[in-house]
Amino acid sequence: MQMNFYRPRSILRLILTGFSLVALPLVVGLVISTVSVDRLVGQSQNALLQSVLVTQGSQVLVEAITAMERHARQYQVLGDKVLFDVYEEKHAKFIDTARSLVELELVEAQRKLLEELRAKEDEVHTVLSNNPHDARATKAALTRFTELAKTAQQILADNQGLINRGVEQIQGKAEEVQRTLVLQAIALVPAALLLGIFFTVLITRPINQVDQAIRRLGDGKFNDPAIVTGPRDLEQLGERLNWLRQRLLDLEQEKAKFLQHISHELKTPLTAIREGAELMNEQVVGDLNTQQREIAGILRDNSLQLQKLIEDLLNFSIMRTRPSSLFRKRLELGKIIVNVLDDHKVALLARKLDLRTSLQSVRLRGDKEKLRIMVDNLVSNAIKYSPDGSPLWVLLFKRDAHAVIEVADAGPGIPVAERDRVFEAFYQGVPADKGHVRGTGLGLSIAKEYAQAHGGDITVLSTGKMGARLQVVLPLEQGS
C-alpha cells in the first residue's frame, strides 16, 4: 500500500489530516441530524401554531354567531337601535375573524365551509339591515342563525380532526427522521472507523518499518536495507538508517579483514614459539633441569592455548564473511568426542580433573571438522572454568530422532541472566581461574553457529547447583 496519492511532509501533518478526515463523516452526520431535527421542530411548531389559530378563530366565530343571534332577536322584539348597533359590532368581529381564518393554512373542506358560512351570514346581515325589526323577512332571517351556528361548529370540529391528523403526520415525519438518522449512523460510523483504521495503518506502518530496521541493525543483519515509506521526515530517517547500515557493514567487513590478517600474522611466530617449546620440552636441544622443564611445559601449554584462540578468530572471521557450508558424510559422533578428549588429555592431567564420560554409539551425517570444533569449544570452555581436581562430565546419547551431547563442569556456573548472552560473539562472562589466558569470547558463539548449521541448537540447562551444563541437540536425519 503506497502513499503516492498523498505524501505529507511530516508525521504530524499526517496525523492532523487523518484526524480531520476521520472526524469529517461524524461532522457531516451531526450537521445532517441537526438540520433534520430543526426542520422537524419548525414544521411541528408551524402546524401547532396553525392549529391553535384555527381553533381560536373557529371558537370566536361560534361565539360571534351566538352573540349576533341574541342581539338580533332582542332587536327584533324591542326594535331598539342600540341593540342593532351591538349586532353590527358582533358582525364586524365575525367578518374580521373569518378574514383572518382565510389567510391561514386551511384544508379544502374547511375553506369551503368558511366561504359558505360567510355567504349565509352576509345574506342574514343584508336582510336585517334593509328591513324593519318587525318585518316578516327579518323574522325569517333570524331562523337561519341556527344553521350558521351548526356550520361554525362543523368548522371547529373539522379543525380538531385536522389537529389529530397533523399530530399523526408529525409522528410519521419524526419516525422518518429517526430512521434516516439510524441509517446515517449505520453508514457514517463504520466509514469513520474504516478511515480511522486506514490512517492508523498509514501512521504506524512507517514507525514499524523504522523499528524493524533498528532491530535488524541491532541483530547485525546489515545486508537488509531499511525501507521506510510514508511521510517525508520518516523517509529521511529511513535514509539515515540506510547510511548507518552501510557504515556498520563497512566496519564489519573491515573488522573481518583485520581479524583474518592479524590471525595469519600471529600464526607464523606462534608456530615457531610452539615448536621451540616442544623441542625444549622433549630435551632435543639438551638436558633440562626440573625448573627448566616446568618452564618449557608452561610455554608449550600457553602456546597451544594461544593457537586455540587464533583458530577461534579465524573460524569466526570465516563464519561472518560467508554462511557455514557443510561437507556431510556418515560419521560416528562418539569417535569425534573421544578424539577431542584425547587432545585435551594434557590439560585434564595438569588440572587433575576427574573426567566422567558416557558415550553411546550415535551415527549421523555431518561435517566432521565443524562438529570437532564445536565439541572442542565446549570441552575447552568446561576445562577453563573447572576448579582443579573437580569432576567434568561429557555425555552422548540418543533421544527420539536426535543426538544429544552434554558437557557439564563444577565451576562457577552461568547466571540465568547471561544464559542467552554467552552465545554472543566476544561476550565474556565470569573470568576463569587465574593462570589461564583470557579467551576471546568466540568459542560458544562458533559452537552455536555450527550446531545450527547442522539443524540443531545449543542451550544452557539449569543444574540447581554450582557448575555449567550445556546441551547440544542435533537431528540424526538431515538434508543435504
Image (tube, rainbow, N blue to C red):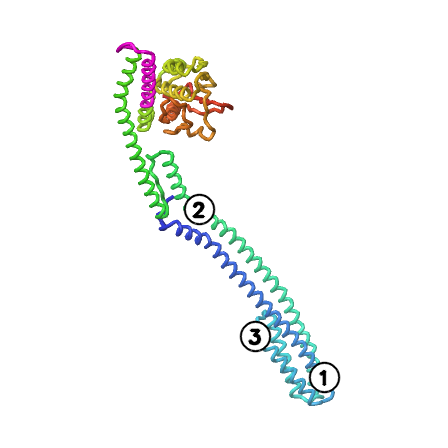
Tell me the number on the disc at residue 129. none
Residue at left offset 30%, top offset 38%: 247
**SS for callout 2:** helix
Tell me the number on the disc at residue 73. 1
In this view of the protein, can residue 310 be seen by the observer?
A: yes
**SS for callout 3:** loop
Q: Amino acid at mark 3?
A: Glu
Q: Nearer the viewer, mark 3 or mark 1?
A: 3
Measure how far apart labels 2 and 3 are at the Cα level.
Answer: 60 Å
Q: Nearer the viewer, mark 2 or mark 3?
A: 2
Q: Is residue 297 magenta?
A: yes
Q: Nearer the viewer, mark 1 or mark 2?
A: 2
Look at the image and tell me in which quarter the N terminus lies.
Answer: top left
In the image, residue 26 lies at what x, y percent?
49, 54
Residue at left offset 43%, top offset 18%: 388
Quadrant of res 368: top left
Disc 3 marks which residue?
103
In the image, residue 108 lies at what x, y percent?
58, 70
In the image, residue 21 lies at what x, y percent?
43, 53
In this rendering, is residue 85 above or below 359?
below
| Mark 3 / mark 1, whichever is N-terminal | 1
In this view of the protein, can residue 331 be seen by the observer?
A: no
Q: Which residues are magenta?
A: 283-311
Q: Is residue 327 magenta?
A: no
Residue at left offset 41%, top offset 46%: 202
Label 3: few (<14), some (14–19) or many (≥20) C-alpha neighbours in 10 Å: few
| Mark 2 / mark 3, whichever is N-terminal | 3
Disc 2 marks which residue?
200
Q: Amino acid at mark 2?
A: Thr
Q: Residue furthest right?
A: 77
